[in-house]
Image (tube, grey):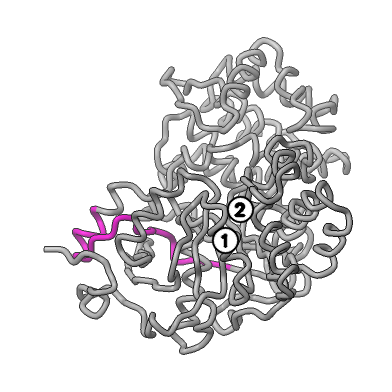
Amino acid sequence: MTTKLSDKTLAALPPGVAGPKYDRAALTPGILHFGVGNFHRAHQAVYLDDLFNKGAGHEWGIVGAGVFAAERAARQKLAAQDWLTTVVEQDEKGRSARVTAAMIDFVEPADVSATIARLADPRIRIVSLTITEGGYFIDPASGRFDPAHPGIVADAGDPANPKTVFGLILAGLVQRRRNGIVPFTVMSCDNIPHNGRVAADGVIGLARLVDDELADWVGEHVAFPNSMVDRITPATTDRERAILADEFGLEDAWPVFCEPFRQWVLEDRFTDGRPALEEVGVQFVGDVSPYELMKIRILNGGHAAIAYPAGLMDIHFVHEAMQEPLVRGFLEKLEREEIIPTVPPVPDTSLEEYFRQIDHRFSNPQIGDTVRRLCLDGSNRQPKFIIPTIADRLKAGQGIAGLALESALWCRYCFGTTDSGAAIEPNDPNWDRMQETARAAKDDPAAWLAMDDIYGDVGRSSVFIGAFSAALGSLWADGARAVLGRYLAG
């Protein structure tokens, strides 16, 4: 018999399931969060739950928010269990479960007036974001905000009825300014380089299209701290729901399964206070950049390195990919020879130890992370996680054989079949374009690198064109296994 998760059952959770040690009724809203997904509920919400369990910060309860009507399904699941979430940490040592209660409400997604009203609430002092790499309206080639994006242009033309996250944030700031309320901090928790600056570019860039004076005011009065966030958190499926019910006796419509590891490095720049998150393991620093570059290149670049060869080999789970010597060997050789050498020293951190820890995390047999998830959205991820490393090595006159092979593996994956001939289902917001270009690149590899919005100057480098073309030709002629074997043999 299972216990259905709700406020009523918090006091009688099954044995082995930890619950909140604080009175939820004492929580008041302090943070509005856009993008209520697994990562947010396993990361920011867990840190706040830890803080609340210490008897501190109860004025920083989380209110969820969403931009798209499609997010209503997630809201309905959480509403049915009073916004509670079960977080299950798992590794080779076993699993542990806890119920977190940091979220206290969730605005109806795509309800513009209700969302702006919440943003204007003086109790909301932080607006946080996990809207994925593709949610920031970034031009992939330049890495800068794209003011010509149709969604941004539409919001600039009708700022009182915004449809984008930046339009909503700006409308909330305008309302607070009109009412004489201190502006909130905009805190990006997304996995993109300089995420605070990128969020600022979006909000200020949109404001600039509306009114120069408004843009100047936002730039002067709103804080956009950069952060580095990390925790491997796969999507929830029936598998995870069944494990929770069978092993812990708890019924949760949307639990989160994740690794034990978590990290949050955050710049201490806020306009109207912040939770005392340093008490629960958040590292506040003056400059996040070294930590951010380390994580994006070594961890996220490492994910890309194992994703595409594993996908072409029909490997399903990430830990299974790490059990394949060719994939694991490719990861280690690429990291040590081409990626890690581009990462400058990081305060109080050993890059060697950091990579060893990542190797261990990727190998976690319990996490259930899928290769398909790692392969997702390469058109947004590669320009952030791989191509800047290529650019740095080309500029320094250093070798790029492994990085060229990684890029060729991505191209081969986007063709839409594995080496066995199995179909690869669409796995990118721009899948049609990526597949069409990959098919053209089979006979003309330069066609792939001609995607200037993705490769920029890297795609025009004769050195890279040559290495990429040779790698892609070999993949088509011999398959991923043979090509990786030759790469590892030198």
**Mark 1 closeness class: few <14, some 14–19, many ≥20 residues within 10 Å:** many
Label disc, if present, on residue 299 of the rendered structure: 2
Q: Is residue 49 left or right of residue 296?
A: left
Q: Is residue 348 above or below residue 469?
A: below
Question: Which residue, given by chain and number where applicable, does mark 1 sit on?
Answer: 230
Residue stretch rendered in magenta on the structure:
242-263
State yes or no: residue 300 in magenta.
no
Name the spot of residue 448 as percent of width and height, x first: 70, 22
**N-terminal-most mark, 1 or 2:** 1
Q: Is residue 268 visible?
A: no
Label 2 secondary element: helix
Q: Is residue 83 above or below residue 474?
A: below
At 38% across and 59% down in the image, what residue appears? 256
Q: Is residue 452 left or right of residue 432?
A: right
Determine the image quadrant of residue 212. bottom right
Asked if disc 1 and disc 2 are in contact, CB closer than 8 Å, the reply is: yes
Report the front residue among 486 and 231.
Answer: 231
Q: Amino acid at mark 1?
A: Asp
At 64% across and 41% down in the image, what residue appears? 381
Q: Amino acid at mark 2?
A: Leu
User: How far apart in space, not on screen, are marks 1 and 2 (Cα)?
Assistant: 9 Å
At 37% across and 62% down in the image, what residue appears? 90
State yes or no: residue 245 in magenta.
yes
